[in-house]
Image (tube, helix red, strand yellow):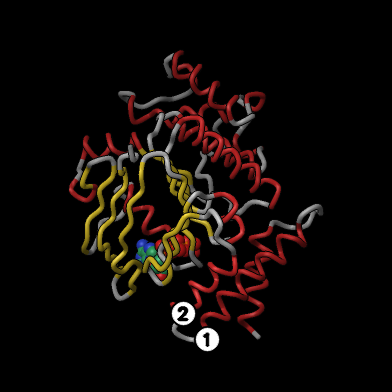
Amino acid sequence: MDAPVVIEVDALDKRFGRTVALQGASLTVARGEIVVLLGLSGSGKSTLLRHLDGLELPTTGSVRVLGEEVPSLRGRRLRALRGRVGFVFQQFELVPSLTVLENVLTGTLSTLRGPRLGLWSYPRSRKLAALGHLDRVGLLDRAYQRADTLSGGQQQRVAIARALMQEPEILLADEPVASLDPESSEQVMSLIREIAMDAGLTVVCSLHQVDLALSWGDRIIGLRHGEVVLDTPTEGLTKTQVMEIYGRVATATAELQAIEAELETADVAASAVSGSDAEPTAEVADRAVAEEAAR
Ligand SMILES: Nc1ncnc2c1ncn2[C@@H]1O[C@H](COP(=O)(O)OP(=O)(O)OP(=O)(O)O)[C@@H](O)[C@H]1O
């Protein structure tokens, strides 16, 4: 029997003033699927993900998640949905001055009454659960360390443990490794996949690297200028085919060249950084793209 559909987006348009962020985006995701949202910066990946959690409202179109029409949800019903959908962000969004354990515990706040100040204020069962999730992400020995003393990769693993506190059915990840070096990126992506497979989680993760999308996801949904231009399983798919699909929909040669340049630059930066103590890939890639643009 086919797995039930848990995410259903239909003809979604989103405008911010005169900026068109999404146009006619439609997709469905079945329970347990591990999907990559692939696209360049500005293609609408974050905006799409944010609609799935009710953080953005559509201009037109519909967004159904776990059977709920998300834009119509308010108050308690919206919080209940968000409790079933974990979110991991590019910049981790931890509270730097709190311990790792307290940060993980904040993942449970929506289910507790009243504010929580300090570790003692959380029920013991939650603390044990938080320690279990920290163990799962390999950071049990860092539980009492301040979050801002950890490396970027470790902070993202804490953010994953925090999302797991909700025991989500769906995990959304918005460029979770964009600010990490290649080695940490690989660890974090592997971890997300392992956890998803173990728990039968549905994952939608935005990325801009074609190679990573191909090696990590079961399926790629490609966005370009807010439109879905690709929706296909990754098995048997090659980078060249992905580029061809983007090429076919690119209206101007210059635009296609820009796409290729950005993807190539990211690859070159990745190989330049791996195995050395150079600066993180994303920064190298961003600077190279900026230099290219300035030429
Ligand atoms: N709150 C906002 N107000 C105005 N414009 C916005 C807002 N959020 C997104 N946009 C615009 O919508 C478009 C899509 O942005 P979005 O962040 O979804 O793209 P993205 O693919 O996630 O890019 P990135 O990887 O750089 O975050 C961009 O042109 C962006 O400037």
Residue at horizontal 57%, vertical 30%?
A: 100
The residue lying toward the viewer, choosing from 113 and 163, is 163
Dot 2 alpha-carbon crowd within 10 angstroms: few under 14, some 14 to 19, many 20 or more: some
Q: Name the image quarter holding residue 266.
A: bottom right
Q: Label 1, secondary structure: give it.
A: helix
x and y, in percent, of residue 68 in the image: 22, 42
Work out which residue is located at the far front of the displayed protein and give it.
Answer: 1
Q: Residue at x 54, y 32 (%)?
A: 98
Asked if residue 227 is positioned above or below residue 212 in the image, the reply reads: below
| Residue 42 locus on image (x, y percent) | 45, 68
Name the residue furthest right: 276
Instruction: Give the quarter of the image for residue 122.
Output: top left
Residue topped by disc 2: 250
Spatial CA distance of label 2 from label 1 is: 7 Å
Residue 180 is at least partly visible in this image: yes
Q: Nearer the viewer, residue 169 or 145?
A: 169
Helix, strand or loop at mark 2: loop
Work out which quarter of the rendered image holds the N terminus and state it: top left
Residue that numbered label 1 is attached to: 253
* Tag 2: amino acid: Ala
Q: Quadrant of ligand 1?
A: bottom left
Q: Is residue 165 left or right of residue 135?
A: left
Instruction: Say the numbered circle drawn on residue 281.
Output: none
Q: Amino acid at mark 1?
A: Thr
Kindly indicate whether the residue at mark 1 contacts the one at mark 2 (C-beta within 8 angstroms).
yes
Q: Nearer the viewer, residue 256 or 136?
A: 256
